[in-house]
Image (cartoon, rainbow, N blue to C red):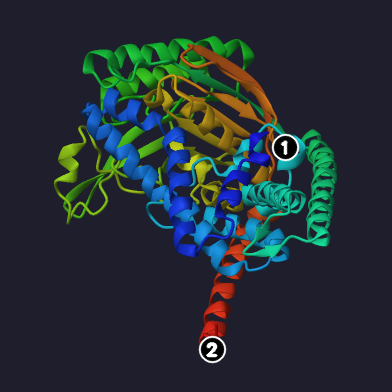
């Protein structure tokens, strides 16, 4: 609820500032926001990275400062381009979406908890994601903030850039927001009904998710590996009464090299055979390539007779967790982080063939990148599967934040999503974003549910982030026009 007016204080503070001062103010606001949003990084790095608390705090501030550059740039751009209150009605939401989208670009992209994700449990509103992605919801929220802000300026007789907000501008912003809001709700109701009908006419399977609740601190201990595999097999066997078509284990549920460690691999295969169904699970893997060993974070799909149908290698690797950026130029960085891997990325959009259908697998935080699940749905994936290990986050808010973003991947592509997490939150999400079932944190459990297999392509799956790109292009064009105007029109220096 707070998201609908959360930006108003920032907009009030920006009133009549120069772009430079606006940048500083936006940076401070962004820094405070990300420090409170990503506080769990300290817990993760200190508990499992064994880093000193002071260094953990420094990394949190550094990461937050980097992300704070986006609201800082938004603030400066707004003050630079938006000279009149009437322009703000659309300028603010367009600029907000443009800079949110920029957070998803480049190799250090981290589009964690964009403002649109705050509406993950509002089914009617989030249905527009199958056209505009999460950015459409972000636009609507930014438009709400703009409407409240302009109305507030009019009622208090305050100005924007030293120009008064007219009654026409205030009422116009209210009308525009109300109209778009009603259209969004109407579309949401219609789309939910149509997708529900599609689900009823689509084939379905039974999927079982297994949450082993393995302590991250001992997971990779050689003495614990056998116990870990034994626990997952025993939990999986409990699902046999439900006759699932597939059993899903979390990321690196097998803490060894599957197919290479013969003893433990045979133990897993026997457990699969005893359960009598197909299994999907995470495991580290490696291949020999060009004289070096290449490591991957992998998901395997294995039949009841032990045959490997296929595998998926994680594409979006965690910087400083699964690889070291600029390692050639910054070799000392690797020494700062204990246990950092050196993984290679897989192939974007790759799916795993399973009978007449294909599975789209996202490992860990890959689910926060819309383009990955979209590329899989576009490549005929009929079901999305997210396997993860959120034990790194403890009891912080991070597992809840992570789960909320997965909901949008289901809505955007109109696919059911099955999520298996080592310590939670595991769950099932239907193609309209309903949470069919979810588990508690740090609980050993196995849950079986029926999920539809849909192959119809949504607008978003087909065309991607056209809306967000249009916002970014519009921002760039306005900047260029402003630059040309300032060059061609001389500044009046008369007193």
Is residue 55 rendered to the left or right of residue 369?
Answer: left
Q: Nearer the viewer, residue 219 or 184?
A: 184
**Above or below: residue 198 compared with residue 250:** below
Is residue 336 found left or right of 397 in the rendered image?
left
Judging by the rendered image, the residue that carries numbered circle 1 is: 432
The quadrant of the picture occupied by the N terminus is top right
Q: Is residue 55 something that shows in the picture? A: yes
Image quarter for residue 80?
bottom right
Circle 1 packing at 10 Å, graded few (<14), some (14-19), many (20+), is many
Tag shown at residue 258? none
* Circles 1, 2 touching at the beta carbon (< 8 Å): no
Q: Position of residue 165 (x, y in %)?
A: 74, 60
Instruction: Check residue 490 in the rendering and tell me which mark sits there, or answer none.
Output: 2
Residue sitting at 52 percent across and 85 percent down?
Answer: 493
Q: Is residue 225 above or below residue 197?
A: above
Residue drawn at x 44%, y 19% is: 395
Q: Which of the image's four quarters has the C terminus? A: bottom right
Q: Secondary structure at mark 1?
A: loop
62 shown above or below 301: below
Residue at the limit of the structure toward the front, as seen here: 495
């Amino acid at each position: 609820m707070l998201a609908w007016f959360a930006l108003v204080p920032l907009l009030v503070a920006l009133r009549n500032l120069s772009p430079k001062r606006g940048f500083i103010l936006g940076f401070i606001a962004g820094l405070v926001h990300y420090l409170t949003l990503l506080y769990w990084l300290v817990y993760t790095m200190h508990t499992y990275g064994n880093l000193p608390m002071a260094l953990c705090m420094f990394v949190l501030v550094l990461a937050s400062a980097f992300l704070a550059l986006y609201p800082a740039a938004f603030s400066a751009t707004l003050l630079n381009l938006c000279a009149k209150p009437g322009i703000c009605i659309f300028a603010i939401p367009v600029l907000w979406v443009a800079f949110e989208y920029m957070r998803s670009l480049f190799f250090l992209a981290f589009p964690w908890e964009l403002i649109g994700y705050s509406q993950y449990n509002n089914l009617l509103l989030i249905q527009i994601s199958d056209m505009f992605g999460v950015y459409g919801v972000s636009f609507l929220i930014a438009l709400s903030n703009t409407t409240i802000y302009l109305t507030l300026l009019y009622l208090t007789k305050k100005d924007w850039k030293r120009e008064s907000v007219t009654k026409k501008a205030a009422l116009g912003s209210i009308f525009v927001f109300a109209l778009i809001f009603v259209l969004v709700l109407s579309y949401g109701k219609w789309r939910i009904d149509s997708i529900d009908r599609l689900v009823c006419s689509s084939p379905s399977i039974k999927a079982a998710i297994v949450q082993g609740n393995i302590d991250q601190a001992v997971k990779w201990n050689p003495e614990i590996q056998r116990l870990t595999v034994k626990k997952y097999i025993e939990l999986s066997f409990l699902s046999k009464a439900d006759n699932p078509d597939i059993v899903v284990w979390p990321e690196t549920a097998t803490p060894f090299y599957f197919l290479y460690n013969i003893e433990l691999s045979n133990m897993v295969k026997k457990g699969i055979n005893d359960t009598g169904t197909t299994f999907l699970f995470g495991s580290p893997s490696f291949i020999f390539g060009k004289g070096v060993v290449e490591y991957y974070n992998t998901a395997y799909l294995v039949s009841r007779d032990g045959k490997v149908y296929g595998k998926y290698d994680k594409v979006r690797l965690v910087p400083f967790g699964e690889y070291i950026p600029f390692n050639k130029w910054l070799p000392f960085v690797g020494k700062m982080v204990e246990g950092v891997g050196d993984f290679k990325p897989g192939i974007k959009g790759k799916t795993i063939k399973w009978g007449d259908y294909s599975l789209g697998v996202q490992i860990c935080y890959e689910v926060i990148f819309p383009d990955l699940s979209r590329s899989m749905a576009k490549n005929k994936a009929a079901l999305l599967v997210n396997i993860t290990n959120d034990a790194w986050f403890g009891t912080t808010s991070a597992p809840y934040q992570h789960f909320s973003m997965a909901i949008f991947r289901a809505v955007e592509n109109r696919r059911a999503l099955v999520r298996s997490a080592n310590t939670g939150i595991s769950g099932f999400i239907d193609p309209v974003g309903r949470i069919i079932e979810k588990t508690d944190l740090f609980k050993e459990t196995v849950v079986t549910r029926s999920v539809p297999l849909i192959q119809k392509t949504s607008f978003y799956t087909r065309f991607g982030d056209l809306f967000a790109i249009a916002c970014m292009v519009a921002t760039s064009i306005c900047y260029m026009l402003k630059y040309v105007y300032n060059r061609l029109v001389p500044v009046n220096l008369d007193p």
